[in-house]
């Protein structure tokens, strides 16, 4: 939940701002294959490279207790061999041809990101289409990769106080919905999931009708489409995966989670419930988030870091998600800071926001930040591919990326204040504290 | 967000290799236009009207941490931080408010050899952004209260850094490797050095060192030349040059470890052990750079690298392992870093040393070298896509006087790198028996596993400083 910056997230919201010729809806070619694979193509010849992004509609929200973290583990296994290409071949072939890649998993999706010279286009489409249908699960490789993911979890959670606290706050604030657990999953699940678990998961969620392909860069759209049909056309579609039906019940009282461990400095994280990205209050809260948390002029930075000297840094905010998730306020307290005082200051500021809302200038500031972030994302083929794919998965159509600024046109200062009052009610908060213990201080 | 590859744990030093890592034809740096202001500031300009954005990068020689007085470790860093904390007419809060209002970014930080200013904004806000930057660079006021606050924040941040072993191991390594050499100074300072500093020290350092005549800047983005010249003239152009510029001394030669220097830092709550192993690298102007880039790519710079193959792909010991080189004018350092659960640290280090020895003595096959070359050439254009990256590259090349055809020459040399030359760079740069190794982990579990590598000095994470 943390760690996913609000930067990328909000960037999508912006796509409609004064559009430059460099990024126009008319330039996006769209095609859906018979097997349900949706393809978005955008030519951009600034550099002789291509960004090929594959978005699958599966993330930790599709998991169940016992197999938490499986979406992310499958992301790792996608590089470990198919019937045609042995373990490691994907990366070897790709890197030999000058390509690089990464992948990421969130609560809602799994995304494979390839960047390569234009000359490698067909080879990359061949590799990607192959692993969408023919993944093999070698038991030895499976065990080795389990170790990698366990190491990743130790790095990001067990040996990272902010990660540890975030996981605990998330699990306290969200009780019923699968957003209860973090994307990496519980350690005991990582250590016990089986080959059957992962192969069933792959068959359920990895199919052309559950994916979106986005290409941005140096290619001819018509020829690229022919290549896509050639390599992906014969992949069979699958029955639609089961829907996620759990609805988080309303929170009726404040919650607290405390971690005591050896540390030099405490950690502090507060969470309230945020709407889904398509929810009515989302734009209001996205604007408010800037005034509250973004930069050294933000309300909480001024109060906590500058005036009261309780904290070293302030962060948090919302994440664009399919289902309602959290609005977080993450504070790095100074060693020895009074955490009760810190919490009281935050509540004061939230109460003021709920009563009075933002100033006109704060609202303009939020819009400037959002516009600036949006254009920054358009500078790269990777940024454009991300924008288009996220719009498609989170809002149902890439077109949303070009019109969503209208949501801000409809905003008013009154509406922002009302959204704040609905969100920051005292009975809906969850407070998390990591309190240093032991010999170090 | 769960990055699959080790890219998320890129060592600081790798930035240089990445920034300079190589392309295919037709995608190198545009040749910038040169504008010299009356006060001597040289600005290199690349127009790019595609998006309404502009980036600035400005490097000030002599204002980095390697040039601060030895007793005031961290002074350059603190001075950089305080540069944006108020002028005669603008308070720190007013500066922050204006920058945030525009959705703009402005940062000053101290690298070793220079202070670096990075800025970006929407084109419509760039004039105001430059006004604020110029006012701060030429007339930072260093209010007492801001000094006290930032100094105390810096001290607390040092304590907090020890909770993150990945960050802490880097700081311990910098100290262990460089010792009293100027490159051993932490930009953040140490508790004792921060204690000694006063606001007068920061004011003096700023007054002497933040001067335009030797500084270089790059501006990339959506602005015309005439408009830019006028804007520069009334902003950075009024920054006063020195009456008598201070002589800039070169850094002393970098340390060259003889034998093994081993340090274990006890972090009793750690469930993973983190290590950095380092040895001499190469200076900025060293011609080995292209061959070393190919070598580093193959050894520990990409997903299928030898280190990642052995430690992650084959054995599942770690999420990330990386080798990288960092270069300064006077020399450089190469490092390997990774982490694994406490009980596996011995195995991890055994394999790392085996791989170092194999690469040193056997080099790389023709097919590997071809793959490494293709990778660098194929990825290079992506490294110069954004205005900020172009500005950073232009300013760096200007600062080190490498010429704006540097990348073309670099890429030609990469294209021509033979297995023999790549192997020779491995023999020269990868350490055999002479290195510095720092491990942060739970000593009780890790100590017995480390014994076979030699005698480790030990520190506790809770001991003051690094």
Image (spheres, grey):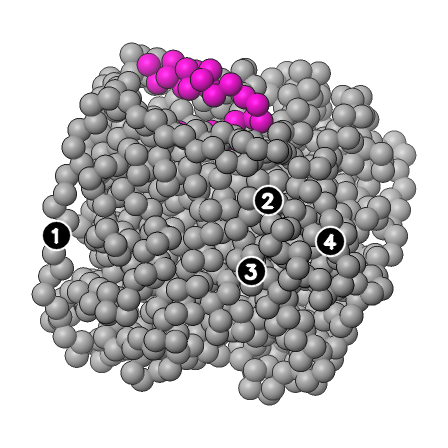
The residue labelled by disc 4 is B263
The residue labelled by disc 1 is A243
Chain identifier of the residue bearing label 3 in the image: B
Q: Residue B268's mark?
A: 2
Q: Are marks 2 and 4 in contact (CB under 8 Å)?
A: no
Q: Are marks 2 and 1 in contact (CB under 8 Å)?
A: no
Label 1: which secondary element:
loop
Range of magenta residues: A329-351
Place of residue A124 in the rendered image (x, y in percent of width and height, measured from the top left): 36, 75
Asked if both marks, 2 and 4, belong to the same chain, the answer given is yes
The residue that appears at 82% across and 61% down in the rendered structure is B257
Label 2: which secondary element:
loop
Label 4: which secondary element:
strand
For the C terminus of chain A, give its image quadrant.
top right
Which residue is more in the foreground, B322 or B405? B322
Chain identifier of the residue bearing label 1 in the image: A
The residue that appears at 26% across and 31% down in the rendered structure is A273
Q: Earlier in the sequence, mark 3 or mark 2?
A: 2
The reply to whether residue B233 is visible in this rendering is no
Place of residue A64 in the rendered image (x, y in percent of width and height, measured from the top left): 21, 52
The residue labelled by disc 3 is B343
């Amino acid at each position: 939940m943390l760690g996913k910056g609000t930067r990328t997230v909000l960037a999508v919201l912006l796509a409609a701002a004064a559009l430059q010729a460099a990024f126009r809806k008319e330039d996006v070619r769209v095609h859906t294959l018979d097997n349900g694979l949706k393809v978005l193509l955008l030519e951009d010849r600034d550099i002789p490279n291509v960004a090929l992004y594959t978005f699958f509609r599966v993330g930790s929200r599709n998991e169940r207790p016992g197999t938490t973290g499986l979406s992310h583990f499958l992301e790792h296994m996608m590089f470990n061999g198919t019937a045609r290409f042995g373990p490691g071949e994907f990366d070897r072939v790709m890197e030999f041809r000058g390509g690089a890649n990464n992948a990421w998993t969130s609560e809602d999706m799994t995304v494979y990101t390839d960047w390569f010279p234009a000359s490698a286009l067909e080879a990359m489409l061949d590799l990607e289409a192959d692993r969408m249908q023919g993944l093999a699960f070698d038991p030895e490789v499976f065990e080795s990769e389990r170790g990698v993911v366990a190491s990743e979890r130790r790095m990001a959670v067990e040996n990272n106080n902010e990660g540890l606290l975030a996981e605990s706050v998330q699990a306290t604030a969200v009780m019923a919905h699968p957003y209860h657990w973090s994307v990496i999953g519980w350690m005991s699940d990582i250590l016990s999931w089986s080959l059957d678990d992962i192969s069933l998961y792959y068959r359920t969620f990895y199919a052309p009708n559950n994916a979106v392909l986005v290409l941005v860069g140096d290619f001819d759209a018509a020829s690229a489409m022919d290549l896509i049909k050639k390599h992906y056309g014969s992949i069979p579609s699958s029955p639609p995966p089961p829907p996620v039906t759990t609805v988080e019940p309303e929170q009726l009282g404040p919650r607290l989670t405390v971690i005591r461990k050896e540390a030099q400095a405490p950690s502090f994280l507060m969470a309230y419930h945020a709407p889904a990205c398509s929810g009515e209050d989302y734009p209001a809260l996205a604007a408010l988030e800037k005034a509250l948390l973004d930069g050294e002029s933000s309300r909480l930075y001024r109060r906590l870091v500058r005036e009261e000297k309780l904290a070293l840094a302030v962060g948090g905010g919302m994440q664009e998600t399919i289902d309602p998730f959290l609005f977080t306020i993450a504070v790095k307290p100074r060693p020895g800071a009074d955490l009760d005082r810190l919490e009281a200051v935050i509540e004061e500021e939230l109460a003021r926001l709920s009563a009075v809302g933002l100033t006109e200038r704060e609202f303009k500031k939020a819009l400037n930040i959002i516009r600036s972030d949006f254009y920054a994302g358009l500078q790269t083929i990777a940024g454009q591919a991300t924008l288009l794919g996220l719009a498609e998965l989170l809002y149902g159509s890439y077109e949303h990326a070009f019109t969503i600024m209208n949501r801000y046109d409809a905003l008013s200062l009154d509406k922002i204040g009302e959204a704040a009052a609905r969100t920051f009610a005292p009975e809906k908060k969850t407070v998390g504290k990591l309190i240093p213990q032991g010999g170090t201080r | 967000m769960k990055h699959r590859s080790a890219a998320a744990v890129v060592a600081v030093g790798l930035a240089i290799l990445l920034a300079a890592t190589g392309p295919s034809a037709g995608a190198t740096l545009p040749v910038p236009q040169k504008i010299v202001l009356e006060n001597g500031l040289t600005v290199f300009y690349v127009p790019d009207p595609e998006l309404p954005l502009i980036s600035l990068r400005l490097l000030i020689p002599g204002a980095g941490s390697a040039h601060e007085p030895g007793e005031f470790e961290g002074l350059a860093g603190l001075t950089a931080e305080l540069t944006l904390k108020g002028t005669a007419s603008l308070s720190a809060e007013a500066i922050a408010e204006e920058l945030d209002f525009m959705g703009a970014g402005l940062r000053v930080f101290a690298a070793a050899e220079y202070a670096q200013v990075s800025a970006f904004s929407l084109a419509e806000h760039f004039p105001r952004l430059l006004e604020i930057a110029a006012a701060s660079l030429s007339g930072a006021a260093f209010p007492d209260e801001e000094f006290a606050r930032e100094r105390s924040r810096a001290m607390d941040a040092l304590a907090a850094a020890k909770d993150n072993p990945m960050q802490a191991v880097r700081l311990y390594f910098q100290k262990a490797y460089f010792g009293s050499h100027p490159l051993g100074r932490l930009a953040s300072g140490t508790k004792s050095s921060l204690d000694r500093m006063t606001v007068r020290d920061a004011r003096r350092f700023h007054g002497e060192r933040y001067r335009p005549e030797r500084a270089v800047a790059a501006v990339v983005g959506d602005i015309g030349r005439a408009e830019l010249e006028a804007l520069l003239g009334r902003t950075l152009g009024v920054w006063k040059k020195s009456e008598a510029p201070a002589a800039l001394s070169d850094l002393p030669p970098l340390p060259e470890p003889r034998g093994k220097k081993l340090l274990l830092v006890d972090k009793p709550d750690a469930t993973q052990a983190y290590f950095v192993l380092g040895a001499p690298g190469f200076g900025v102007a060293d011609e080995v750079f292209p061959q070393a880039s190919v070598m580093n790519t193959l050894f520990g710079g990409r997903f299928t690298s030898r280190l990642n193959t052995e430690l992650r792909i084959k054995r599942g010991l770690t999420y990330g392992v990386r080798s990288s080189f960092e270069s300064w004018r006077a020399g450089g350092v190469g490092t390997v870093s990774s982490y694994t659960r406490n009980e596996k640290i011995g195995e991890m280090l055994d394999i790392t040393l085996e791989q170092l020895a194999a690469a040193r003595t056997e080099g790389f096959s023709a097919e590997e070298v071809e793959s490494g070359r293709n990778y660098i050439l194929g990825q290079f254009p992506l490294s110069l896509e954004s205005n900020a990256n172009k500005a950073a590259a232009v300013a760096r090349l200007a600062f080190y006087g490498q010429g704006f055809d540097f990348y073309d020459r670099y890429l030609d040399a990469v294209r021509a790198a033979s297995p023999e030359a790549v192997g020779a760079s491995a023999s020269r740069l990868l350490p055999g028996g002479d290195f510095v190794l720092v491990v942060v982990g739970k000593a009780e579990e890790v100590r017995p596993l480390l014994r076979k590598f030699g005698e480790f000095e030990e520190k506790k994470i809770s001991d003051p400083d690094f």
